[in-house]
Amino acid sequence: MVESKNTRRHKIMPIFYNVAPSEVKYQTDHYSNAIVSHANKKRFDDDTIDNWKAALNEVGALKGWDFQSMPNRGKGEFVKEVVNNVLIELKTAYLEVSDCLVEVNNHVDEIMRMICTHNHETKIVGIHGIGGMGKTTLAQIVYNQLSDDFSNCCFLSNIRETEITRLQKSTHIEHPEEKMARYQQYHGRKKVIKERLCSKIVLLLLDDVDEASQLDARAKA
């Protein structure tokens, strides 16, 4: 794990369960006995054992969870906290943006000021202008800066094309039963979305919106 951390930029999130971080860092108690035992039995060479010691020292110094230092925390609450943090680390919210950008910082700062992440009220910020001026890129930069503050993030691109495709599909002739089934399925999905997101703070980026109805449909879902 330590090798992957140092060579592949992987992250280690240690959980110290029934062991103090200092025991791992300095190889005391059981760790010391185990290392001495391996060294005496000559099962591994000295370089391997030294690498073990260095790895344990590095892991013991990392910020993680020390269950022993939380006497008032139940196991369920502890596990929930760990899982939530791991999910935040694993989320792939980051959007690739070109490094060759000119004069965007002022616009980004102004949008961030308008959003003000310390205030958790619902906010809708629109970026408008003529085509090709960099609205999507600007929105992606803001999205990347905000994503760490949200456990739930979503980027929906080409909203206009999606709406056109949906409109085209709806023009074919349907039997009444098919139309009712599609209606029930649509409103069933909206209900599920409401139930799952009603108590969550969500970051949603809609790209290429050109009709107020497109925003309303997703904001009201």
Image (tube, rainbow, N blue to C red):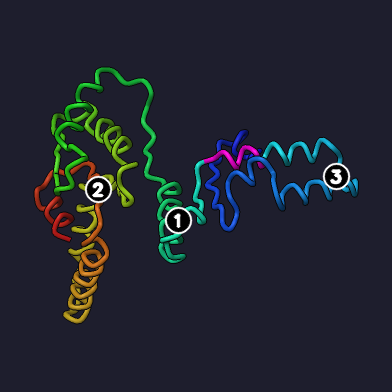
Mark 2 residue type: Leu
User: Label 2 vs label 1: CA separation?
Assistant: 35 Å
Foreground label between 2 and 1: 1
Would you place residue 16 above or below residue 119 in this image?
A: below
Q: What residue span does the magenta drawing correspond to?
A: 56-62
Residue 124 horizontal side relative to residue 98, left or right = left
User: In x, y percent, where is residue 152?
Assistant: 31, 52
| Quadrant of the rendering where the N terminus is positioned | top right
Give the residue at mark 3: 39
Q: Residue at x 60, y 42 (%)?
A: 59
Q: Nearer the viewer, residue 202 or 139?
A: 202
Give the residue at mark 2: 204
Q: Residue at x 20, y 75 (%)?
A: 184
Hey, which residue is sitting farthest left in the picture? 212
Mark 3 residue type: Ala
User: In x, y percent, where is residue 111?
Assistant: 18, 32
Foreground label between 3 and 2: 3
Q: Residue at x 25, y 22 (%)?
A: 105
Would you place residue 17 above or below residue 106 in this image?
A: below
Q: Nearer the viewer, residue 71 or 140?
A: 71
Q: Which mark is residue 70?
A: 1
